[in-house]
Image (cartoon, rainbow, N blue to C red):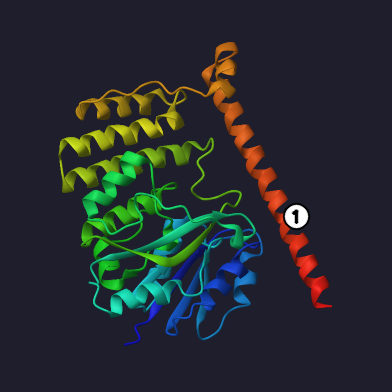
Amino acid sequence: MNPLVSILIPAYNAEEWIADTVRSALAQTWPNKEIIVVDDGSTDQTLSVARQFVSETVRVVTQENQGAAAARNRAFALCQGDYIQWLDADDLLAPDKITTQMKAFTSGTSDRKLLSGAWAYFMHRPQKAKFIPSALWCDLSPVEWLVRKMAYNLHMQTATWLVSRELTEAAGPWDTRLMGDDDGEYFCRVLMAGQGVHFVREARVYYRLAPGSWSYIGQSERKLVAQFESMKLHISYLRSLEDSERVRTACVTYLQNWLPKFYPERPDLLNQLEQLAETFGGRLKPPKFSWKYSWIEKTFSYSAAKRAQLSYNQWKASSLRAFDKFLLRLERRECSGQLR
C-alpha cells in the first residue's frame, strides 16, 4: 500500500524560512506525497520564493490575507491526500517523519487515531534542538490527553500530527475566528472525533522560534480575545467528554495558568474567567511576579512590571536568535574552509 500524504503549508511573510520548510517536505522519504503551499497575502517575497519549488509534487497558490486558519482550510480543500500533514512555514520535518508514522497506519493502527511524535524548539540550527519528553508523549485517550494538556499547561506542536483524511473531515474546518491557539482548538475537535492518540517517538519535528510567530499574543487585543474564545471551547470540549472532579480541577488550573495574559488590562474577561472557575468549584488567585519584577510592581504598578517582563523577554529572544544565527554562519564558514 502506498497512500498519498498531503503536506499542507500556510505561509505569511515567511520569506526567510519557507525554502527550508519546503525542502524538508520534499526530503520526506515517504514516496507518495503532494505539497501545497498557500500564501496568505504576504507582503514580502514569500510567494516568489515558494514558486521556485513548483513541480508535479509542489503546488503554490495565493489568496488575500485572511489568517492562518483560512489558509489551512484552502490548502485542505485543494489536496487529494489519504493522510494529512500540517506544516507551518517556518518549521521542519525530519526526513523520515512521515514514513515512520505511516508504518503505524499501514501495520494496522486505526485511521480514527491521531498519530503524534516528538518535537523540539530551535532557532537557526535544528541540529541543536533538544527533545524533552512531556506527559503528552505517549498513547492517550482523548479525555486523558486533554486533561494533561490543560492541567500541566502542555501542547503538541502542529506538525507532530499525522491524521487520516477520514478523521480530518470528521473534525471539520479550522476556526477562522481564532487568531491564537487555533491549532489547539482544532486538534481538540480532531481528538473528539477520533479514538485517541498513538505516539510515535521516532517521528521528529523541529519547531522554529521565529520572530512574529502567529501564536505569539504580546499586546494584541484581537489575539487576546481570540485566546479567550479558544479557552472556552477547550473547556466545553473536555467537559462534553467527561464531567468529573479531576476534569473540573484541570479546568481551574488551565484558567489560572492563562490568567496573567488578561490581568489587569481586561477586567471584563477576568470577570468571566473568575465566574468560570467558580462554576468548577475553584477560585483564581491574582498572578504574582518573580523577584526580578516584583519590585517594579511595588514601585510603579502591575502593568508596568508586566510591560517590563514582556520587553525583557522580547530582547532576550532577539539576542539569542541573533547569536544562534552568528554561530550558524560561523559553522558554515568553517565547513566551507574544510572543503577547499
Residue 87 visible in the shown view: no
Horizontal arrangement in the rendering, residue 157 relative to residue 105 (left or right): right
Horizontal arrangement in the rendering, residue 158 relative to residue 291 (left or right): left
- Whether 246 is drawn above or below 205: the answer is above
Residue ID at (40%, 42%): 226
Residue marked by disc 1: 326
Of 238 and 143, the residue lying toward us: 143
Within 10 Å of the Cα at label 1, are there few (<14), some (14-19), or many (20+) other Cα atoms? Answer: few
- Whether 191 is drawn above or below 55: the answer is above
* x, y percent for residue 330: 77, 60
* x, y percent for residue 9: 49, 67
Q: Residue 281 appears in which quarter of the rendering?
A: top left
Of 79 and 181, the residue lying toward us: 181
- Whether 238 is drawn above or below 165: the answer is above
- Whether 293 is drawn above or below 317: the answer is above
* x, y percent for residue 193: 22, 60
Residue ID at (63%, 77%): 52
**Where does the C terminus fall, quadrant-wise?**
bottom right
Q: Residue 82 appears in which quarter of the rendering?
A: bottom left
Residue ID at (65%, 39%): 316
Of 253 and 187, the residue lying toward us: 253
**Where does the N terminus fall, quadrant-wise?**
bottom left
Residue ID at (26%, 56%): 140
* x, y percent for residue 298: 55, 12
Residue 135 visible in the shown view: yes
SS at mark 1 in the image: helix
Of 218 and 95, the residue lying toward us: 95
Give the residue type at disc 1: Phe
Horizontal arrangement in the rendering, residue 263 relative to residue 46 (left or right): left
